[in-house]
Image (cartoon, grey):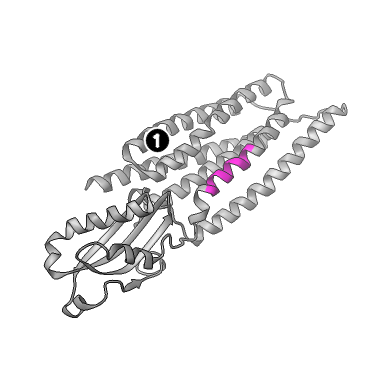
Amino acid sequence: MNEGADQRRISYRLLFTTLWATLLLLAVEAIGGWASHSLTLLAESLHTLIDGFSTVLSLVAVTSPQRQMGREVWGHGRAEVAATLVICAFLGFTGISLLFIALGQIVQALGGGANAFPVSLDAPVLRFTAMMVIVNVALGVYASYQARSLNSLALKLNTQHFLADAWLSLVMVVVLIAIWQNQAWLDPTFALLLLPLVARSLWRVLNEQLPMLLRPTAIAPEAIAHLVTQVEGVTHCRRIRSRGMVGRQVWVELHLVLHPELMEAADQIEAQVEALLRKQYGPLRAQVWVEPARRQETYLPPDPVDYLPPSEGGWG
């Protein structure tokens, strides 16, 4: 097994382990929150759901054959778009419902209503939740370290998203302890603080990934062909595909047709082409195939483009 495949396998295992740990924490928070009538646990479960969604997107990037190790491009298909819409609809409905319930409890308490805060936390729920939060934070720190050593963009983005809000989970544990100590008013109050942060977390995930969910062409194939054919020895540039976002990360695939006398210098020409593209468009990773020019092609103008859309040739 080569080094790239081994690093990709490690990234996949880390993300898969993170996903299962996140799902377990989600189940604990959702079931415990429902059973104990804790708005804090229910609101935090929405945040954990977003963490799980981010991890799923990272797994898609790592397992895609066009994105070895998940570090070249974030590009997703219609299944991920549909999942995004479902997640947004569910979070919107549930978040608004929790918001009204929390406001209702606070208004009732201010009006002197009895039993305004029906939350009743059990010690086993508190202990298990605290244990799972600590395990998830430790796993996130370890995955962040591995992301730097593996140079995996998918793993890096996922751990950055998780660790950015890890402090919130730790604060939640402290709040739950206070609620367990009969400070029930903290339950709706902290839930009201959590809900806007849940919306911010969702926006951060969508802002990083949604622009590339539909797999748009990142760079016009004509522009790539015009640039590449300026390299000495390149007569044609064919089957050009590109995805990603210029300035952040772009994946380019193309076929070069070289003059027969320069086929021995194919490796150097490939390096020149990739360096030229990276200089023009910023962070970029290219996959280049080389073939010799046929006799009649040697005398053609050096700028024809054979472009295939991303849905063809294994890009679907």
Q: How many marks?
A: 1
Residue 38 visible in this rendered orientation of the protein: no
Rendered residue at 32%/56% (across/down): 277
Q: Give x and y (percent) for residue 77.
A: 47, 60
Q: Looking at the rendering, in which quadrant would you find the C terminus?
A: bottom left
Residue 208 visible in this rendered orientation of the protein: yes
Q: Quadrant of residue 66?
A: bottom left
Rendered residue at 46%/37% (across/down): 160
Kindly report the secondary structure that dominates the magenta region of the rendered protein: helix
Q: Give x and y (percent) for residue 155.
A: 40, 42
Vertical placement of residue 20 versus 133, above or below = below
- State the residue position of label 1: 143
Vertical placement of residue 215 versus 57, above or below = below
Q: Give x and y (percent) for residue 20.
A: 46, 41
Left-right relation of 159 to 263: right
Is 287 colored magenta in this rendering?
Answer: no
Rendered residue at 19%/73% (across/down): 293
Amino acid bearing label 1: Ala
Instruction: Give neighbour class at mark 1: few <14, some 14-19, many 20+ (Cα, 10 Å).
Output: many
Left-right relation of 128 to 247: right
Residue occupying the far bottom of the picture: 296
Vertical placement of residue 19 versus 121, above or below = below
Vertical placement of residue 294 versus 124, above or below = below
Q: Give x and y (percent) for residue 1.
A: 21, 48
Rendered residue at 49%/27% (across/down): 134
What are the residue bounds of the magenta stretch? Answer: 197-207
Q: Quadrant of residue 233?
A: bottom left
Circle 1 SS class: helix
